[in-house]
Amino acid sequence: MVPRSVNASAAQTDYTFGRVLAIYQQKYALIESSQGLGLLALEEADFLLKCAQLLPENENLKPQPLLVPLKVTLSKDEINTFKQFQALISDFGIVIDISHGKATIHAVSLPLRQQNLPVLLTKLLAYLATEKLCSKQQIGHWLAKQLSHESGVWSQAQAVGLLADIERLCPQYVRQPSKNLLQLIELQPVVAALNNERSKNANKT
């Protein structure tokens, strides 16, 4: 089967990946759409969805107060890193106060609420410490990788839900999927091979 790239037609408005037929190697979805059969990389789709959730166009994420603020002990270097990037961190709805060597996390945005926030903050500061300059997009992509599907094993139900979210929140990836997101499968060579074998067997009988 030969893969080929795909773009939706210019007249198409109901952007959809179609039906999920099966999961292949636990991280790819075999899909059937109006464009034909295709193999979709679920890890890439999940990353793109997280990026869309963390980096909404023309707005910052809104902080949602935690029921119980969380305290995290930070080193002097970590505090300095936080102060350097505090404005960018706050763009993701993260509200933190620093006092007496401890960070108190008061609020985070919706995409981050299910995370282990003390661990996430420590890892984020370690990442930022290696970056002299860092953009909002870079931080968003880093956070998206941390939030991505952890087990790496996808069920068909999870794949269906993921693709529905992609279609709803970022249809541009359905309209023009990148080659590392979706490859259509050309079945004609397989059909030709089957017909060839049938002809050989027919000639033997």
Image: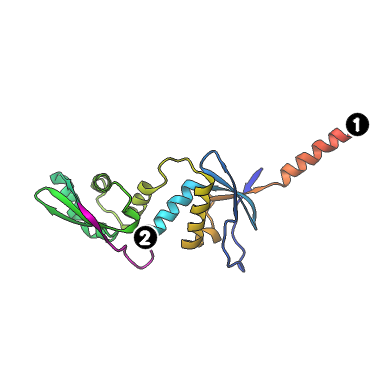
The magenta segment: 56-69
In this image, 104 relative to 40: left or right?
left
Residue 1 seen = yes
Q: Which residue is mark 2?
A: 55
Relative image position of residue 113 (x, y in whole percent): 31, 53
Residue 85 seen = no
Looking at the image, which residue is at 15% across and 44% down? 75
Q: Quadrant of residue 23?
A: top right
Marker disc for residue 205: 1
Relative image position of residue 169 (x, y in whole percent): 46, 62
In the figure, 14 relative to 157: above or below? Answer: below
Disc nearer the start of the sequence (1/2) = 2
Query: Crowdedness of circle 2 by 10 Å Cα count: few (<14), some, many (20+)?
Result: many
Relative image position of residue 61 (x, y in whole percent): 32, 62
Query: Crowdedness of circle 1 by 10 Å Cα count: few (<14), some, many (20+)?
Result: few
Judging depth in this view, the residue of 38 and 114 nearest the camera is 114
